[in-house]
Image: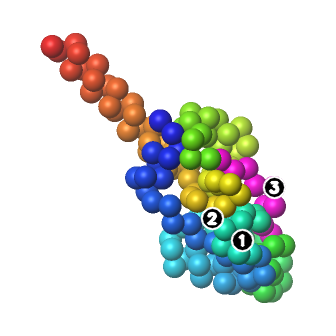
């Protein structure tokens, strides 16, 4: 199974935020969409960075006026991306090895989706349940 299959099921909508937005704006965006990470993009298509709840927690711990800090000051600038043709198993390996929970999906330099570790695990569980069902049917026939 490929990442494209995951995106077909969940959709390609990606919430982005400007690098110049404040952490207060970021918090509102995360709450509005009930998400844990946002792709940082100056134009809504490029991937300039990624910022998550974890980044906010690190900032908030001891930073006065943390809400006024710009997103580009706390974002991860070195972003690992994937493509729709990547295999689910390879994406799981990337997420595990790099200890990341969100991977932007890019085609020809343009942002086309975002997958989370939850999306990938849900997909893999679906594959395993299907295989189990097929084996049960084979054995009982």
At mark 1, the secondary structure is loop
- Residue at 81% x, 61% y: name it: 77
In the rendered structure, the answer to whether residue 37 lies left or right of residue 51 reads left
Residue 22 location, quadrant? bottom right
Residue 133 location, quadrant? top left
Viewer-nearest of discs 3 and 1: 1
Tag 3 or tag 2, which sits nearer the N-term?
2
Residue 78 lies in the magenta-colored region:
yes
Query: Which residue is label 2 attached to?
Result: 37
Q: Which residues are magenta?
A: 74-82
Query: Which residue is label 1 attached to?
Result: 41
In the image, is residue 11 above or below residue 138? below
At mark 2, the secondary structure is strand
Label 2, residues with CA under 10 Å away: few <14, some 14-19, many ≥20: many
Q: Is residue 57 visible?
A: no
Query: Which residue is label 3 attached to?
Result: 78
């Amino acid at each position: 199974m490929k990442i494209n299959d995951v995106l077909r099921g969940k959709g390609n909508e990606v919430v982005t935020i400007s690098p110049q937005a404040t952490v207060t704006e970021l918090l509102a965006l995360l709450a509005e969409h009930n998400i844990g990470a946002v792709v940082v993009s100056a134009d809504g298509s490029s991937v300039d960075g990624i910022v998550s709840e974890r980044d906010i927690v690190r900032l908030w711990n001891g930073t006065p006026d943390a809400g006024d800090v710009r997103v580009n000051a706390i974002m991860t600038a070195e972003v690992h991306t994937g493509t729709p043709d990547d295999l689910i198993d390879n994406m799981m390996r990337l997420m595990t090895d790099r200890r990341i929970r969100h991977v932007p999906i890019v085609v020809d330099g343009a942002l086309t989706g975002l997958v989370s570790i939850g999306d990938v695990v849900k997909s893999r569980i679906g594959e395993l349940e299907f295989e189990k069902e097929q084996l049960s049917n084979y054995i009982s026939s």
